[in-house]
Image: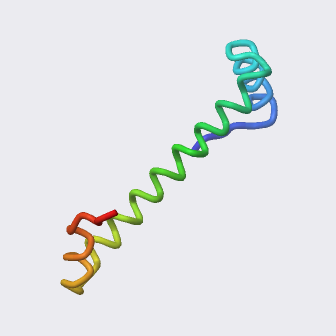
Amino acid sequence: MFNIGPQELFILFLIVLLVFGAKRIPEIGRSIGKGIQEFKKGMRDVETELTSDKPEEKKAAEEPRKS
C-alpha cells in the first residue's frame, strides 16, 4: 500500500519536529492515542448494543441512573 522507507520516515519526522517543536510531540502523541482509545470504546459500545439480544440489558441501559 505505502512504500515508506527509513529515509522517508526520517524526513517526515524532521518536518514534524520543525512544525510542532520538540516539546509538543509527546503531547500530540498522547492526544492521538486518547482519541483512538475513545473511538475504539465507542465502536465496542455500539457493537455491544447492536448485538445484545436481551431486552433487560437494553431497558437497563436506557433508564437513567439515580444518584
What is the x, y in percent for residue 15?
72, 17
Q: Is residue 36 left or right of residue 22?
A: left
> Looking at the picture, how far across and down is residue 25, in whole percent?
72, 27
From the viewer's perspective, tell me whether residue 32 is left or right of residue 22: left
State left or right for residue 42 relative to residue 38.
left
Q: Is residue 55 above or below residue 23?
A: below
Quarter of the rendering containing residue 13: top right
* Residue at figure coordinates x 64%, y 31% from the top left: 28
Q: Does residue 54 lie above or below 38 as drawn?
A: below
Q: What is the x, y in percent for residue 1?
A: 56, 46
Q: Nearer the viewer, residue 63 or 40?
A: 63
Displayed quadrant of residue 27: top right
Going by the picture, which residue comes out furthest to the front?
67
Q: Residue furthest top?
A: 18
For image coordinates 69% across by 37% down, the residue present is 4
Please state which of residues 63 and 49 is positioned toward the viewer in this rendering.
Answer: 63
The foreground one among 14 and 56 is 56
Identity of the residue drawn at 48% across and 51% down: 38
For image coordinates 40% across by 57% down, the residue present is 42
Of the pair 52 and 11, the residue shown nearer to us:
52
The C terminus lies in which quarter of the figure?
Answer: bottom left
